[in-house]
Image (cartoon, rainbow, N blue to C red):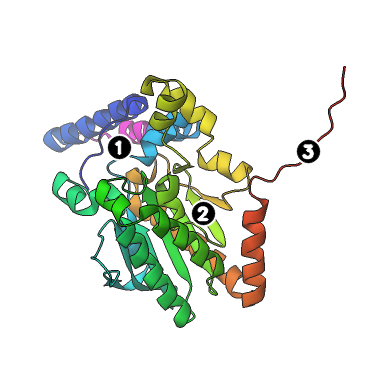
């Protein structure tokens, strides 16, 4: 895996990593035993990673969620599932590569897997449209969710998008209608549904795959109605206030768990998911198997009733009388 680009708050971490690398190179050249020094530095590095990533500000969480070396949907599919068979097209317009879909096996059992997919370089990002799906992407997703329902198989979705694509062609082909239709249909699908926010959960683009029985979030992922930059531009007339907006939006996994929107936060290794894809996938796999096992115990009627109750309770409020002074 290529070296990860450095985030500003990772400066001290990168410095120690550099010291370790130099020490290893020096030992190889000179033949000196530097085992003790390496052990001290590696212990210091792990402690620093843990302390740094346990105390991230909301805007730093946003930076981690957008990290270019963070594992994407296909990276997780490769590590969490077996027997992946990708499916294509909405049978109406074209195959939108911003969303991938296909059959796979989880713990030996067949599931339908869908998710937003970003690119690693300019060429792939243009092909994937930076993970921003068009209407045909959401219609493709619904086509395969219905296929899963037909065969009585659970659906797992991975959410990682700045939002649905807002271009002219996308609007002409009905992006709002496509997302709204998915929301309605997912609410009624008669199979277990699990969504996992693995990076950015942005606006309606995320919701188009997000009406599920369980909403899981990787520890340093975010889920919000709008980006901090967009919120700052609207409320403060300047994207420079994105730090303030990120805090006000309460978009971190910890915030959303507390608000009752997320059902579980999946821990990431020290240094974030981009530092260890395999360890992240292992935690993700365990959480998916456990949650699916719980959902499979419910009858279809109980499953749908619990799903409706979950979304009825989000944003619940009540009137209170205020005494006049």
What residue does disc 3 label?
319
Q: Nearer the viewer, residue 162 or 255?
A: 162
Q: How many marks?
A: 3
Viewed as shown, does residue 148 lie left or right of 192?
left
Residue 64 percent coordinates (x, y): 38, 37
Which dot marks residue 35?
A: 1
First in sequence, mark 3 or 1: give its number.
1
In the structure shown, which secondary structural element does the residue marked by tag 3 occupy? loop
The residue drawn where x is 33% and y is 44% is 274
In the structure shown, which secondary structural element does the residue marked by tag 2 occupy? strand
First in sequence, mark 1 or 2: give its number.
1
- Residue 45 occupies quadrant: top left
**309 lies above or below 325:** below
Viewed as shown, does residue 1 lie left or right of 299?
left
Q: Nearer the viewer, residue 5 or 253?
A: 253
**Residue reaching furthest front?**
172
What residue does disc 2 label?
216
Cβ–Cβ below 8 Å for labels 2 and 3? no
The residue drawn where x is 63% and y is 42% is 258
Cα–Cα gap, marks 2 and 3: 31 Å
- Residue 236 occupies quadrant: top left
Please give the range of residues in magenta. Answer: 32-42
Residue 43 percent coordinates (x, y): 40, 35
The residue drawn where x is 59% and y is 69% is 295
What secondary structure is the stretch in magenta mostly built from?
Answer: helix
**Residue reaching furthest left?**
29
Cα–Cα gap, marks 1 and 2: 40 Å
Q: Is residue 297 magenta?
A: no
Residue 92 percent coordinates (x, y): 28, 70
Q: Nearer the viewer, residue 212 or 35?
A: 212
């Amino acid at each position: 895996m290529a070296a990860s680009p450095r985030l500003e708050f990772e400066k001290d971490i990168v410095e120690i990593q550099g010291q370790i690398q130099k020490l290893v190179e020096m030992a190889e050249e000179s033949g000196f035993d530097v085992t003790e020094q390496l052990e001290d530095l590696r212990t210091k590095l792990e402690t620093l990673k843990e302390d740094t990533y346990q105390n991230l500000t909301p805007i730093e969480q946003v930076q981690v969620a957008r990290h270019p070396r963070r594992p994407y949907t296909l990276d997780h599919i490769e590590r969490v599932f077996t027997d992946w068979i990708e499916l294509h097209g909405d049978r109406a317009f074209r195959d939108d590569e911003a969303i991938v879909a296909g059959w796979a096996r989880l713990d030996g059992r067949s599931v339908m897997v869908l998710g937003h997919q970003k690119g690693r370089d300019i060429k792939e990002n243009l092909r994937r449209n930076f993970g921003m799906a068009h209407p045909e992407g959401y219609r493709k997703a619904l086509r395969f969710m219905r296929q899963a329902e037909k065969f009585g198989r659970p659906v797992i979705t991975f959410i990682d998008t700045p939002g649905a694509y807002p271009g002219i062609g996308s609007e002409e082909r009905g992006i709002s209608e496509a997302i709204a239709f998915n929301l309605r249909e997912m609410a009624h699908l008669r199979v277990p549904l699990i969504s996992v926010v693995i990076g950015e959960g942005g606006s309606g683009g995320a919701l188009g795959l997000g009406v599920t029985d369980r909403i899981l979030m990787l520890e340093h992922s975010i889920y919000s109605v709008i980006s901090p930059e967009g919120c700052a531009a609207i409320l403060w007339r300047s994207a420079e206030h994105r730090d303030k907006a990120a805090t006000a939006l309460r978009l971190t996994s910890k915030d959303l768990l507390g608000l009752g929107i997320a059902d579980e936060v999946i821990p990431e290794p020290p240094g974030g998911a981009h530092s260890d894809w395999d360890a992240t996938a292992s935690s993700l796999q365990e959480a998916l198997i456990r949650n699916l096992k719980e959902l499979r115990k419910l009858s279809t009627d109980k499953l749908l009733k619990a799903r409706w109750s979950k979304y009825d309770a989000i944003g619940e409020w009540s009137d209170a009388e205020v005494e006049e002074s």
